[in-house]
Structures are given as C-alpha cells and as structure tokens.
C-alpha cells in the first residue's frame, strides 16, 4: 500500500463528550463529517488534544472504531497510541490496526533518565516490529521530557522505515526540520504546535502539519496555495490568521479554546474537557469572540 496519504493537513481532533462526561459516539460522526467537509487530508485522534490518556481501554476501542466508521474511507485516520509501557503501546497500536486505522502516532516513553537513546530506540523498534502501519514519531520534548536529537531520529528511520514520519514539535522547529532532512532525506516531517510555524516549516521541507486547530480549512488553504506555487498567497493567508493561531495555542487552555470553537461551529455538542483541566474565564472568551469577529470567521455575538 502506498504511504503517500501521510502528507498535508492532519487535523488533531478532540474527543466528544456528553454533558455527563461519557463518550459521545454519535458526536464522533458529527465531528468527523464536519472536519472531512473542510477538506483536510486526514485526522489524528487520541493524541494530547484528544485526551487519549483520559479514556478507559473500552472507550479507546469504541472511539477508534467510531472514528474509522465515520470516516468511511473518505480520509485516513491516524491514532495516537503512546504509552510509557512498551507492551501497552504495542497493544494500543495493534488494536488501532485491527480497527482500520491507517497510521499511528507514538511519543517516546517518559523515562527516569530522559537521555536514554537505547531505551527509546528499543521502544520504537518493538512497536515497529509488532504492526504493519506507518508510525509517526512525535518529537515534543515539552510534553514528555525526552529530547530526541536529529541524529537519533535520522538513524531510527534508517533502521526502521516504518518510523520515517516525524511530527516535529521541538522548538524552534523550522531549523530542526532542515537538519533532520539533511541527516536523512527519506524522513517525512510534519509540523505541529498549533500551526504557529507552519509556513516556515514548509519552507524547510515539511510535508504538512499535524495539529489541533478550530479552523483547519485555513491550514488547508495555506497548504494548497504553497504546494501549487502560490507562495505569496500562502503567506498572505498565514499572516492574516496568525493572531488566531497564536491565541488558540496558549498552553494549558488550548484544548478548551478549540472545543469552544468546535461547539460554536456546530461540530461538538458540549465544550466539556475531562478533569483535571483548566477552564476558560470570561475574559478569554471575550478575547476569542473579538478575534473571530475581527477576522470575520464566526459571529458569536
């Protein structure tokens, strides 16, 4: 099977909850239909933005099955299967494959000694040997405390070709994109971080971005313009919406902001984020409404 599907805009979507905190399975179809309609190239579920760590094993299986069924082959589904225990990561990854996912995203395990390349290498190689899917290696040291050097990810991709996709979120990301591709041209690099450096990442050779964002069609527009040679047009769109990209990606409350936007757009039935979580104060909501009004994106008055 060709792996060309792993490029472009992969929207990392939230997990829909009912008002009582239970999994909203009909809401998964509602959200999927909405996102597919915006022209994204794929969806990533059960990542940090999908509150993957807050789901029970049963909820995880039901979520993956529901998203795959809702997508119905229209776009590929990439499933976050990260776990600090290698066997659990393997189990989640095998489950995702069995349920119809086309790729998995795996962050390095948190280790007592973060600088432990042999242990991280063994973790990824074990997962790669256990499944037949592409593995998107998530390089986000802020969230897991593990730094992966360019030399490490380049060597890992050579040793395990299933691991040649990299979701690079080690800041500053654009220079590392360039260094990674220089170290191993077979790597396929996605940006992330809410799309804050998306334009610059593509200039350095990224094949797209895999990120949460409440208006993914904006990222699709930037990508389509850039990849068809309209660099100035892509730049104009990116610069126009940078205030929203910046505002959405605030640490601790970025998921809450995105859930509010999806709710206002009719894609989610609730804005619930499972505890523990940081809520949004009235000032933040007012600022969000003001940005959306000024950018003429949504009338939430």
Image (cartoon, grey):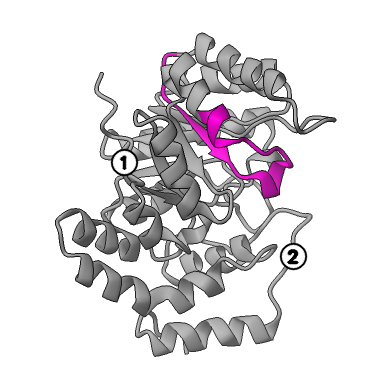
Where residue 124 sits, quadrant-wise, is top right
- Height in image: 261 above or below 19? below
The residue that disc 2 covers is 278
Nearer-the-camera pick, 159 or 61: 159
State the separation of the CA atoms marked 2 and 1.
Answer: 32 Å
Q: Quadrant of the N terminus?
A: top left
Where residue 247 sits, quadrant-wise, is bottom right
Where residue 54 sits, quadrant-wise, is top right
- Height in image: 44 above or below 153? below
Nearer-the-camera pick, 186 or 219: 186
Residue at 27% across, 55% down: 37
Instruction: Say few, some or many: other residues with alpha carbon within 10 Å of mark 2 (under 14 / 14 to 19 / 20 or more).
Output: few
In the picture, the disc for residue 7 is: 1
Residue extent of the magenta highlight = 132-153
Q: Position of residue 187 (x, y in %)?
A: 39, 32
- Height in image: 204 above or below 146? below
Q: Any magenta on residue 144? A: yes
């Amino acid at each position: 099977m060709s792996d060309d599907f792993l490029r472009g805009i992969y929207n990392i979507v939230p997990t829909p909850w009912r008002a009582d905190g239970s999994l909203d399975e009909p809401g998964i179809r509602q959200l999927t239909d909405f996102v597919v309609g915006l022209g994204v190239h794929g969806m990533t579920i059960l990542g940090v933005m999908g509150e993957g760590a807050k789901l029970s094993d049963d909820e995880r299986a039901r979520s993956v099955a529901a998203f795959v069924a809702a997508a119905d082959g229209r776009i590929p589904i990439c499933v976050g299967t990260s776990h600090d225990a290698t066997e659990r990561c393997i189990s989640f990854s095998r489950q995702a494959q069995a349920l119809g996912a086309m790729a998995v995203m795996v962050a390095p395990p948190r280790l007592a000694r973060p600088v432990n390349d042999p242990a991280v290498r063994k973790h990824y190689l074990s997962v790669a040997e256990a499944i037949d899917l592409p593995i998107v290696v998530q390089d986000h040291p802020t969230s897991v405390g593990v730094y992966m050097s360019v030399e490490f990810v380049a060597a890992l991709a050579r040793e395990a070709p299933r691991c040649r996709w990299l979701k690079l979120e080690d800041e500053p990301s654009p220079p590392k994109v360039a260094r990674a591709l220089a170290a191993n041209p077979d790597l396929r690099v996605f940006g992330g971080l809410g799309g804050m450096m998306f334009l610059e990442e593509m200039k350095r050779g990224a094949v797209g971005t895999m990120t949460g964002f409440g208006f993914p069609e904006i990222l699709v527009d930037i990508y389509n313009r850039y990849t068809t040679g309209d660099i100035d047009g892509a730049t104009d769109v990116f610069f126009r919406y940078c205030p929203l990209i910046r505002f959405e990606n605030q640490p601790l409350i970025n998921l809450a902001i995105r859930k509010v936007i999806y709710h206002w757009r009719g894609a989610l039935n609730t804005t619930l984020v499972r505890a523990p979580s940081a809520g949004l104060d009235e000032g933040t909501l007012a600022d969000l409404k003001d940005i959306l009004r000024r950018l003429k994106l949504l009338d939430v008055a």
